[in-house]
Image: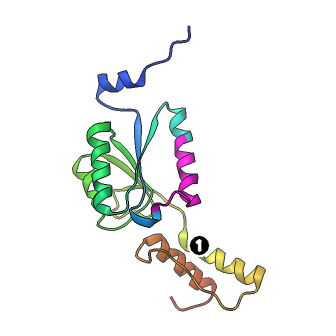
Amino acid sequence: MGYKPNYNAKTLTTGVSNAVGVIFPPGEMSMSANPFFVDLLMGINKELQSRHAMLSVAIANSSQALVQNVETLISQGLIHNFILLYSVSNDPVIELLKKQGMTYVLVGDPNEDSENYVNNDNRLAGQRVGEYLIDVFRVTHTLFVEQLPELKFEQQRRLGFQKAMKLPT
């Protein structure tokens, strides 16, 4: 008969939306030109579409502005589930999500045993890149460039790269 449910009406009735908030890291790392984030968003969006859910994005240049953005998503959008595309210790966004009783998943290393997360082996990735440079290009002098050295994944990639280059860690 062509019936399609009205998800906005359902949101009004239940008080819970069918949307997931995706939170980018604050600052320059959030640049949309980063192919890692674009690929992640495409994968998340594809999965949400199959569940008739929507994607809402929180993005800002500072932690303070990002917290305000997420507060807006919580209060106006009735979003209760979030995916953080980063992981840092003492994150004010995570503190807000906890305080508000929101469910969240980190992309990266967890800060606590109780946190839900997805991750890859960044140390092994850094090591494989170093090995590739040595094996394929026979490099002897390298430079490891990182955007924010305090991020855990950057530290792990550096350690793997140093291992491949047989540098002290």
Residue 4 coordinates in the image, percent (x, y): 50, 17
Indicate the amino acid at tag 1: Leu
Q: Is residue 80 left or right of residue 38?
A: left
Q: Give the quarter of the figure containing the N terminus.
A: top right
Report the magenta residues as a range. Answer: 30-45
Please, what is the dominant secondary structure of the magenta stretch?
helix
Q: Residue at coordinates 59% horizontally, 86% vertically from top-left?
A: 143
Q: Alpha-carbon neighbours of circle 1 within 10 Å: few (<14), some, or many (≥20)?
A: some
Q: Could you say whether the residue bearing mark 1 is in a helix, strand or loop?
A: helix
Examine the rendered structure and indicate whether residue 78 appears above or below residue 91.
above
Examine the rendered structure and indicate whether residue 63 appears above or below residue 7.
below
Q: Residue at coordinates 35% horizontally, 64% vertically from top-left?
A: 111
Q: Nearer the viewer, residue 42 or 136?
A: 42
Question: In the displayed image of the protein, which residue is found farthest to the left?
Answer: 99
Question: In the displayed image of the protein, which residue is found farthest to the top?
Answer: 1
Q: Residue at coordinates 63% horizontally, 87% vertically from top-left?
A: 142
Residue 137 coordinates in the image, percent (x, y): 76, 82
Examine the rendered structure and indicate whether residue 116 appears above or below residue 1.
below
Q: Specify whether residue 43 is painted magenta.
A: yes
Q: Specify whether residue 62 is painted magenta.
A: no
Which residue has dot 1 on it?
Answer: 124
Q: Is residue 71 left or right of residue 4?
A: left
